[in-house]
């Protein structure tokens, strides 16, 4: 009799998958849309419900707009009652990541600076935003800033977010390619965190900090020679804040002195005119003489155009200013004389800055010989 071996039944184990169902809220830009949440063209699927819940939590925290574009729930993948349609996370972020809060209203909840590993020094400031009832973390180093919805660097909020850096990223700035005017509402927070980071790095840690001029905090800008900052910005040269918090122009001063003493230039002379015109004209002539004594040619519009145009007539004054700026574009440098910066002089300084023309602030008194570069505080 043939013995029959018992057959083992195959046992199939069903492993459920969890997905995130997104539904646009009423009156949002995506109103009426819903579907499985996708990222980079793929449905977000999780084998554990806790992982799906964590991602849902991160997505909710990414919203920095007072009106979120969508709401979310965790569901089983391909539930029979759920239509097979999708809603891209990138589309939702396009609206949720548009900042909508009061940029001047914030509370500093936490600050930390140190080595995150491999010699990478990072400063982090946690800001609580009352208008959103949310905390964001601004992380700085010499390269730039990242703003996150969780403590990605130090994990003080116990979010375990180090491995989820992309999931919590709100905003990213590279100091070399981004300008302060392009960061919108984030600027006050970035400047605050940057000042803290520089102070810690150049202070008790005794390390220098290097960054482009336009990102320099006001406290350092105000204590640095303006002509050096103009030169550094015009030449796309980053400045270095030395240990102790001082900016040393270094080689620029030597090079600038040699250029100042040797190069033959066409110098645009800016000095006060209105008010005590008789005194101011004599002062302007003295300024021009000092330019010539240094071997340079000069152009002083306020010694020329008022003799042809009526400076008290707005239209003729504007014409004189326009012609002066036209000549300024052909000059090598703008030299500013006097203790007072008039509106007309400020317009000339601003025009020189826009055109990348170096501006020298000169110290000169009546009947003085050769001028010397100095710092004059604009009034």
Image: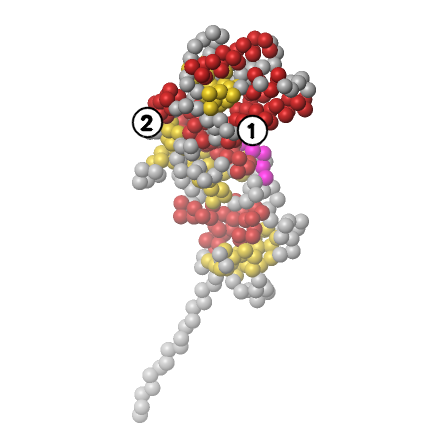
Q: Residues within 10 Å of mark 1 (few under 14, many from 20)?
A: few
Q: Nearer the viewer, residue 34 or 297?
A: 297
Classify mark 2: helix, strand or loop.
Answer: loop
Can you tell which mark lies on residue 206? 2
Would residue 283 be seen by someone viewing this image from the given angle? yes
* Residue 226 in picture, x, y percent from top left: 45, 22
Q: Is residue 137 above or below residue 92?
A: above
* Residue 188 in picture, x, y percent from top left: 52, 32
Q: Residue at x 56, y 51 (%)?
A: 92
Q: Residue at x 41, y 18 (%)?
A: 295
Q: Which residue is mark 1?
A: 326
The quadrant of the image that shows the N terminus is bottom left
* Residue 356 in picture, x, y percent from top left: 48, 30
Q: Check whether the beta carbons of the residues at disc 1 and disc 2 lie within 8 A of each other.
A: no
CA distance for labels 1 and 2:
47 Å
Classify mark 1: helix, strand or loop.
Answer: helix
Q: Is residue 249 above or below residue 178?
A: above
What's the image's color scheme?
Answer: secondary structure
Instruction: Of the two numbered discs 1 and 2 on the same chain, state the one appearing first in sequence.
Output: 2
| Dominant secondary structure (helix, strand or loop) of the stretch shown in magenta | loop
Q: Nearer the viewer, residue 186 or 152?
A: 186
Dot in front, 1 or 2? 1
Q: Quadrant of the rendered structure where residue 280 is? A: top right
Furthest toward the bottom, the residue is: 1
* Residue 28 in picture, x, y percent from top left: 64, 49
Q: Residue at x 54, y 27 (%)?
A: 327
316 displayed left or right of 183: right
Q: Magenta residues?
A: 100-108
């Amino acid at each position: 009799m043939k013995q029959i071996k018992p057959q083992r039944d195959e046992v199939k184990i069903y492993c459920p998958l969890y997905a995130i169902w997104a539904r646009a809220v009423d009156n949002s830009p995506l109103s009426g849309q819903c579907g499985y949440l996708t990222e980079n063209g793929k449905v977000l699927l999780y084998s554990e419900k806790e992982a799906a819940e964590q991602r849902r939590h991160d997505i909710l925290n990414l919203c920095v707009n007072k009106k979120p574009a969508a709401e979310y729930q965790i569901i089983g993948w391909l539930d029979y009652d759920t239509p097979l349609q999708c809603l891209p996370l990138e589309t939702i972020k396009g609206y949720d990541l548009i900042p909508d809060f009061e940029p001047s209203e914030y509370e500093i909840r936490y600050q930390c600076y140190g080595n995150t590993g491999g010699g990478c020094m990072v400063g982090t400031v946690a800001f609580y935003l009352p208008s959103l009832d949310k905390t964001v973390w601004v992380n700085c180093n010499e390269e730039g800033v990242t703003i996150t919805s969780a403590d990605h660097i130090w994990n003080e909020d116990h979010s375990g977010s180090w491995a989820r850096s992309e999931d919590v990223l709100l905003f990213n700035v590279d100091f070399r390619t981004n300008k302060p005017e392009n960061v919108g509402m984030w600027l006050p927070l970035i400047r605050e965190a940057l000042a803290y980071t520089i102070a810690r790095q150049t202070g008790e840690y005794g390390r220098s900090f290097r960054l482009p001029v336009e990102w320099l905090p006001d406290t350092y800008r105000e204590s640095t020679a303006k002509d050096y900052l103009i030169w550094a910005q015009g030449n796309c040269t980053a400045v270095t804040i030395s240990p102790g918090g001082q900016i040393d122009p270094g080689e620029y001063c030597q090079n600038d002195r040699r250029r100042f003493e040797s190069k033959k230039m066409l110098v645009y002379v800016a000095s006060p005119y209105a008010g005590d015109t008789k005194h101011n004209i004599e002062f302007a002539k003295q300024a021009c003489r000092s330019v010539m004594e240094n071997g340079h040619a000069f152009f002083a519009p306020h010694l020329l155009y008022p003799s042809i145009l009526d400076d008290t007539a707005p239209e003729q004054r504007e014409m004189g200013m326009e012609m002066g700026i036209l000549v300024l574009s052909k000059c090598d440098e703008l030299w500013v004389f006097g203790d007072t910066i008039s509106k007309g002089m400020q317009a000339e300084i601003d025009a020189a800055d826009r055109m990348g023309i170096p501006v020298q602030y000169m110290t000169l008194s009546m009947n003085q010989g050769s001028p010397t570069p100095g710092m004059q505080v604009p009034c």
